[in-house]
């Protein structure tokens, strides 16, 4: 799994929070019992838990999973202590490989959730995760998966080439032979849950909308976006270097607007009806 620096995760947290699809919360609230357990996969610094725990009522038991012990420590210490209705929230952390989770590991879990994770997985890993969730009878909320669509204003003639190379990089074969899903992840996950009989599958757009007041996030995102594109297609480098400098100058001057699209996915198990 890819490692991310805490500074980057904290920098993007406000944009993540603004992007998350709040319309998915009402059906989730209708499903969850008054006392429930949540497993947050690839939790990072805990940004999803900080956002979600305070928006759900009921007594909550959060189990945070990540391979990075430093991030786990950040996350465990930072989740809110009370839920939307004032009920208690408790948190434990477990270092583990989230791709190895199976139905038996999810016993007693009401909700499996993750943010910016599905696009880092392979088709087989997403299918195995969906199988584990459905067999365990859990709900699942996957947020902020890359969908490959980027809108920059003002537009630049090189935008499509950079976007295409970046999306190819997101679908690359890693050094250990894993072919990542990248922008295909939400489609693959939704189809997998559908095949497995999940009764409710709701999708929503969750786009970052970055304006002049987010120049530092624009800068770091641009450097990563263009850097990944050049890594995938090295022949882009001569024009990409000039392109990046041009875009960075626009961001610094407050002239750049960026919409980076993501997808959110809510899945509820087939065994329980949910109020409309």
Image: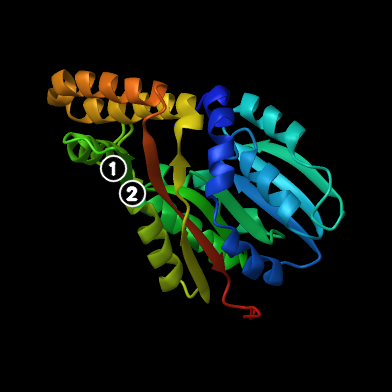
Pick the front one: 62 or 231: 231
- Residue 114 drawn at (x, y percent): 56, 48
Q: Is residue 150 visible?
A: yes
Categorize mark 2 by other alpha carbons within 10 Å: few (<14), some (14-19), many (20+). Answer: many
Residue 21 falls in which quadrant of the image?
bottom right
Q: Which residue is mark 1?
A: 171
Between disc 1 and disc 2, the foreground one is 2
Residue 110 falls in which quadrant of the image?
bottom right
- Residue 104 drawn at (x, y percent): 62, 57
Who's the residue at 46% across and 56% down the image?
128
Q: Which residue is mark 2?
A: 183
Q: Is residue 52 above or below residue 238?
A: below
- Residue 261 drawn at (x, y percent): 39, 48
Q: Is residue 209 above or below residue 174?
A: below
- Direction from residue 5 to residue 109 in the image, left or right: right
Q: Is residue 38 above or below residue 223?
A: below
Who's the residue at 47% across and 61% down the image?
204
Q: Is residue 1 visible?
A: no
Residue 28 falls in which quadrant of the image?
bottom right
Q: Are marks 1 and 2 in contact (CB under 8 Å)?
A: yes
């Amino acid at each position: 799994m890819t490692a991310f620096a805490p500074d980057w995760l904290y920098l993007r947290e406000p944009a993540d929070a603004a992007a998350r699809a709040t319309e998915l919360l009402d059906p989730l609230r209708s499903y969850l019992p008054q006392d429930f357990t949540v497993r947050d996969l690839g939790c990072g610094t805990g940004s999803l838990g900080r956002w979600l725990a305070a928006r759900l009522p009921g007594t909550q038991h959060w189990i945070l999973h990540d391979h990075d012990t430093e991030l786990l420590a950040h996350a465990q210490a930072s989740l809110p202590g009370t839920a939307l209705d004032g009920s208690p929230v408790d948190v434990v952390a477990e270092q583990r490989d989230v791709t190895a989770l199976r139905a038996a590991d999810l016993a007693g879990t009401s909700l499996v959730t993750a943010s910016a994770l599905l696009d880092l997985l392979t088709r087989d890993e997403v299918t195995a995760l969906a199988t584990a969730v459905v067999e365990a009878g859990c709900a699942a909320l996957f947020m902020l998966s890359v969908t490959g669509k980027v809108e920059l204003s003002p537009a630049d003639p090189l935008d499509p080439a950079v976007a295409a190379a970046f999306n190819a990089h997101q679908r690359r074969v890693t050094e250990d032979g894993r072919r990542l899903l990248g922008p295909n992840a939400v489609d693959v996950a939704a189809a997998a849950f559908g095949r497995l009989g999940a009764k409710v599958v709701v999708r929503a757009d969750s786009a970052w909308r970055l304006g002049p007041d987010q120049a530092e996030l624009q800068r770091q995102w641009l450097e990563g976006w263009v850097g990944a594109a050049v890594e995938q297609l090295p022949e882009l480098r001569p024009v990409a270097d000039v392109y990046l400098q041009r875009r960075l100058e626009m961001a610094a001057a407050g002239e750049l607007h960026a919409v980076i699209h993501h997808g959110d996915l809510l899945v509820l198990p087939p065994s329980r009806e949910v109020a409309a």
